[in-house]
Image: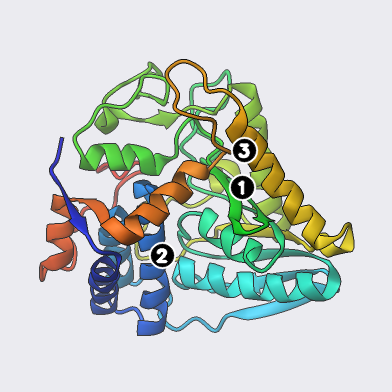
Amino acid sequence: MNETVVVKPEELHDLIEKKLTTAGLKPEHADEVATHLVFADACGIHSHGAVRVEYYAEQIDKGGVTLDPQIEFEETGPSSGIVHGKNGAGQFVADKGLKYAIDMAKKSGVAVVGISKISHSGALSYYVKKAAQQDLIAIAMCQSDPMVVPFGGKENYFGTNPIAFAAPRKGHEPVVFDMATTVQAWGKVLDARSKNKEIPNTWAVDKDGKPTTDPHKVNGLLPIAGPKGYGLMMMVDILSGMLLGLPFGKHVSSMYDDIKKGRDVGQMYILIDPKRFTDLDMFKESVDGMVEELHAIPAADGFEQVYYPGEINQINYEKSLIDGIDIVKDIYDYLKSDTLHFDRYENTNAFGEKK
């Protein structure tokens, strides 16, 4: 397993921002992407943190991201709209789209806002948490590369198609839950590769459709809970792809297939103002009461206590802000180096492997 180093969040942010601006990204955009990646690493979601920087740098450097996108918000109704992202830096466009959605939800009570043509936008928990900090309930979902074997099949069709949810809580940070509709996100395999670490044989299959523990031999991911995860990823694809008039399923462009070309990927926000349904303070107190009742349940053998889904990430985040963030040393050395990228990703398949 690769050695790790502890890095303060501020240093990690500055290193990432510098690498992205060197690649050609505008400082304002690079700052938002760096803030997002540091958040992911601080939460322990290393699959969506600094491990992504080299890919982003190569993509930006080779023209795969619009450096100055003229982002437009098309209001299609009092509670609906589409953000035309023009293939700008994913996290920057998604955050801008979230602001439109938050404003609309506060005005109308509900907002359903899609983001059309966005590059990789990172961990969805980042966005729903920001919405919940504004006293809104938030759901987010997005398409991703076709790299999942459908239940009962042998060839990849859907992506990992994640879903995230957040709700405000009285006196504490929001409850936030973020999951891929696969047993694990592709980024978890990428993280395992960076650490030269085996993966469980329940995560993925090789080119022959057989379970594998070697992250370098992954040729297809598996849906969570078999047909249930398969159904969820179909739902996500319909809501964040077809509903926005974008490619779906196996037609979704790969992150790596043509790194010089923009991506036609969609993301969807559904925001709800609890005040339109109940007393806000009572609602937040109920969410907090649920958490306290979960904490009070006796822990099963092998567990320290019961946490709400996603709580470990919040604990990691708070700890990392004080103690620093564990980063794979090879990634840290790359961030500190003068090397922009190593030409690893151009002309590779959905798993970052040379064709």
Is 139 on the left-hand or right-hand side of 262?
right
Residue 274, can we see it?
A: yes
State the residue position of label 2: 261
Q: Residues within 10 Å of mark 3 (few under 14, many from 20)?
A: many
Query: Element under label 2?
Result: loop
Query: Element under label 3?
Result: helix
Q: Up-down: is 179 above or below 257? A: above
Is 160 on the left-hand or right-hand side of 188?
right
| First along the sequence among labels 1 and 2 | 1
Is 328 on the left-hand or right-hand side of 83?
left
Is 6 on the left-hand or right-hand side of 180?
left
Tag of residue 248: 1
Tag of residue 279: none
Query: What scheme was used to colour the molecule?
Result: rainbow
| First along the sequence among labels 3 and 1 | 3
Tag of residue 233: 3
> What kind of residue is marked 3?
Met
Tell me the residue at 31%/42% (across/down).
190
Where does the image place residue 211, in percent across and percent down from the top left?
Answer: 37, 17
Marks 3, 1: nearer the viewer: 3
Rounded to the nearest angstrom, the CA distance separating label 3 from label 1 is: 11 Å
Tell me the residue at 77%/76% (across/down).
75
> What kind of residue is marked 2?
Lys
Tell me the residue at 59%/57% (across/down).
172
Query: Element under label 1?
Result: loop
Where does the image place residue 57, in percent across and percent down from the top left?
Answer: 28, 66
Observer-nearest of 320 and 200: 320
Tell me the residue at 58%/50% (across/down).
176
> What kind of residue is marked 1?
Phe
Residue 350, can we see it?
A: no
Observer-nearest of 256 and 287: 287
Where does the image place residue 195, in percent across and percent down from the top left?
Answer: 20, 39
